[in-house]
Image: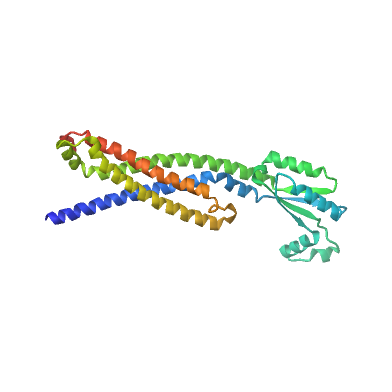
Amino acid sequence: MATSYERYQKRRLISSYFSVILSIFLVLFLLGSLGLFIINSEKISNNFRENIPMSVYFKDTAKPEDLKSFEEEVKKSAYIKDIVFVHKDSAAVSQQEVIGEDFVHFLGFNPLQNSFDLHFKGAYVEQDSIKNIELNFKENNLIDDVVYDRQLVDLVNKNIQTITYWVLIISGFFALIAMLLINSSMRLSIYSKRFIIKTMQMVGATKAFIRKPFIWTSVKLGMIGSVLAIIGIIILTYYADQKFPTLHLLQDYQSLITVCAGVFIVGIIITYISTYFATQRFLNLKSDDLY
């Protein structure tokens, strides 16, 4: 009978430990993922901004040396990420593939113009900055038109600000949930041993002596949960890096190490604090209150 009871207690203890580790893993994985997003938020937002193109169309009177001079001048600018020359004949071929008709043959001439497709660095894809660049280009008499999606620029910047704001709120919410959830799991784990705690007190054990093994056990569970969360974050980062290779998330070792170290430390701190206050509560209970 005693053996059966001991097995039951052991299964109950393992189940309690598993729930604690699972709670720590889930919460820290979510917090770590949000932390990684916040750290790389500027890089992610710049990636979206830098994919918004601007097309600069030149008049037919522009000579090859004029086009070359413009390209070299723009390449020296601080705002440029890349610039690609699009010859009018290449543009005509692309348009023919899109519409499925040879409009050059039909019209008897190519109505398109030589142009440059520009992508700017993320910091310059703001309405004021990009407007100044547009006005600067239009001062060139050889440039016929400058085209970019103004609404898309506004929409991207507005959405990035909104997303960043809500991510910060959600991160704070999850941090609070983490404390409550892990604290609850710790208290449930210690609750099953409340009689052992009271027995140790009755034979003269100090609070620090009683508390020590509980804290150490909880910290070890916190370490296990943290390591599992770190593995999950690394897998998530690898997946995101495969989907968005231009972000180079895996190459940013500093950010990844910072998040993983933060997750590990937070896992230890939360379990330590939760266990300390949970054991303190049962240490202060009277014998009648244990039931």
Q: In which quarter of the image is residue 31?
A: top left
Q: Residue 57 or 33: which is nearer the viewer?
A: 33
Query: In the rendered image, is residue 59 in sight?
Result: no
- Give the total of numbered labels: 0
Relative to 162, does residue 101 appear above or below in the rendering? Answer: below
Q: Residue at x 35, y 46 (%)?
A: 222
Query: Relative to 218, is 141 on the left or the right?
Result: right
Q: Residue 274 or 93: which is nearer the viewer?
A: 274
Q: Residue at x 27, y 49 (%)?
A: 16
Q: Residue at x 77, y 60 (%)?
A: 91
Query: Relative to 193, is 41 on the left or the right?
Result: right
Image quadrant holding the N terminus, namely bottom left
x, y percent for residue 214: 26, 43
Query: In the rendered image, is residue 216 in sight?
Result: yes
Q: Residue at x 76, y 48 (%)?
A: 74
x, y percent for residue 82: 70, 52
Q: Looking at the image, which residue sits at the far right? A: 61
x, y percent for residue 283: 22, 35
x, y percent for residue 41: 55, 45
Query: Relative to 243, is 277 on the left or the right?
Result: left
Q: How is the protein colored in the picture? A: rainbow
Image quadrant holding the C terminus, namely top left
Query: Relative to 209, is 132 on the left or the right?
Result: right
